[in-house]
Image (cartoon, rainbow, N blue to C red):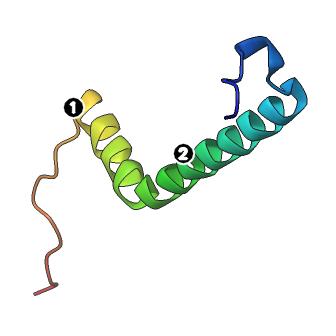
Amino acid sequence: MKQQQRFWEVDLIELVKRWAEDMKTFLLTVLLFLGLSLPVVIPTLILWYLVSIDFRAVGGMTLPP
């Protein structure tokens, strides 16, 4: 029967490698999410800015007579 491994017998180098791989995966996921959200975020920021300066679209385009 195998003895139970104690926490001080854990290979710290292997633990740090595993943690680094997990962090890499997490950061790539965050980067992918931010990249995919740009088509929504950019127009939202533009509209937010226009509302903040009290921009009003009055009239619009008219054709010459």
Q: Residue at x 64, y 49 (%)?
A: 25
For the C terminus, which image quadrant? bottom left
Task: Residue 6: give x, y in percent of width and height.
Answer: 71, 16
Mark 2–mark 1 Cα distance, whole angstroms, equals: 34 Å
Q: Nearer the viewer, residue 46 or 39?
A: 39
The answer to whether residue 42 is left or right of residue 12 is left
Could you tell me the amino acid type at mark 2?
A: Val
> Mark 2 or 1 closer to N-term?
2
Q: Residue at x 18, y 72 (%)?
A: 61
Task: Residue 53: give x, y in percent of width and height.
Answer: 29, 30
Assign a secondary structure to mark 1. loop
The answer to whether residue 30 is left or right of residue 65 is right
Badge 1: residue crowd in 10 Å (few <14, some 14–19, many ≥20): few
The answer to whether residue 51 is left or right of residue 11 is left
Badge 2: residue crowd in 10 Å (few <14, some 14–19, many ≥20): few
Question: Mark 1 highlights which residue?
Answer: 54
For the N terminus, which image quadrant? top right
Q: Nearer the viewer, residue 16 or 31?
A: 16
Question: Mark 2 highlights which residue?
Answer: 30
